[in-house]
Amino acid sequence: MVSKLQNLDLFTNNIIGTIPTEIGMVSMLNDLKLYDNKITGTIPSEFGMVSTLRNLELYANNINGTIPTEVGVLQDLQTLALHHNNINGTIPSELGMMFWLINVRLHDNILTGKIPSELGKAKNIEEINLDSNLITGTIPSEIGQLIGGFAWFGVLRLILSNNSLTGTIPSEIGSLPQLEQLHLFTNRLSGTIPTEVGNLKALEATFNLSSNLLTGTVPSELGLVATIKKLDLSRNGLKKSLLHLGESTSYTYLNVSHNVFTSFPFNDAWRELETFDLSNNNIVQKIPENLAPLSSLKDLLISNNYFYGSIPNSIRSLVRMERLHLDHNVLYGTIPDDILSLVRLRELKLSHTRQGRQCFHHLWECSMIIKDYKGGDLCCYRNDGTQVCADESKVEIEDPDICLTPEIYGTIPVGFSNTPYLRVLELSNNALTGNIPPEIGALSRLEVLDLTNTTLTGSIPSSLGAL
């Protein structure tokens, strides 16, 4: 009998078999570390007899069964690390009765049921990690009570991602000013983003609410959290953003793709922004003429929207650009030579801008009388309210109608030898004319070349055989 044993460390071996129930007889055990082995079977309920246990670390094994409720009587327990196993069942509500509990790491199991509201009573918890389970139900509002009476305690990490949580994000989360990590992505959370997130001044660099069912407006308060550098709100149902009204100027990554935004103002203060992803929304706005303030951009992804206007010459100022996706919009005009000054460019997508010739009644649908048109770009409106724009060369006056042919046209610019890293070049479904520039054949890294459904002429350059 090893009744006086205090620490049992057998981690990172090839131990097989089950945990013996006799472990409950080691009455003075403080630390049990059996992680990173090949242990099978269940967690013995006899652990509840080891009242001195402080750290129970059984992670990275093949343990199955449920978490015994007897664990909840271990009043001295500080760390419960059972992650990366095959543990099922529910999270015992008894965990909320454990005053000294600091770390709860149950991620990467197959736990089901709800997050017990009793966890809000465990005042000294610093980490709750339930990532990658099958947990359902709502996030209990009692989570907001987790700050203890000691300045060095309190929730610092709340990781609930990759589950099936429903309901809204409780506003009580804003009562956790020491919260450093809040991971809620890949659930089924609905409702709006609470304005109280603006109180989370200690949040780490990455804040991710992607792949949920969130709706409404992105609150300006989120922009007040200056610590956030990477913000991912993609794959939700968000409609409007006030983020540009916030004070944060430190974003390096901003992804709001796959939502239903109808507009998303560019903020000139985002001078450190490297990735800006607005793709797959319903954004109807003119592409900004001055992109120079966003000179740190590496990825500008605005595909599958209704951006209109011509590609601005200021594109040349984005000297760090690597991925430029402008496809599936309603852009018009020619491809400026300035794009070929982007020597780091790896992906250029300008396909699917052709919409065909469309005619409108000058007064009702173009908000003007024909005699007042003095040249320049012109926009008219379809019956469904969507906008159609074209530059002067694609505007035709047929009194009482005005006909527009919005599309990218002209020749493919010469000078692709300046973009030696180019891997993807997609210019299909446009009104491009002229020949295929032979220097495209010098792009030794090119993997995708799509020029289908254009009006290009001439022969296929022999240089393409070198690709």
Image: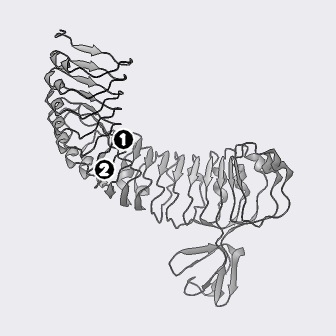
Residue displayed at 50% across by 65% down: 283
Label 2 crowd bin: few (<14), some (14–19), many (20+), radius 10 Å: many
Residue shown at the point (37%, 51%) measured from the top left: 222
As drawn, the label of residue 165 is 2
Question: On the rendered structure, is 268 left or right of 310?
Answer: left
Q: Amino acid at mark 2?
A: Leu
Measured along the vertical axis of the image, is residue 418 above or below residue 54? below
Q: Give the spatial CA distance, label 2 vs label 1.
A: 11 Å
Residue depicted at 60% across the width and 63% down the height:
328
Q: Of helix, strand and loop, which one carries label 2?
A: loop
Q: Residue placed at 53% from the left, 57% from the top?
A: 279
Residue 3 position in % (x across, y down): 16, 11
Residue 356: name its quadrant.
bottom right
User: Can you identify the residue that label 1 sits on?
Assistant: 132
Of the pair 22 and 274, the residue shown nearer to us: 22
Residue 346 lies, in percent from the top left, at 66, 46
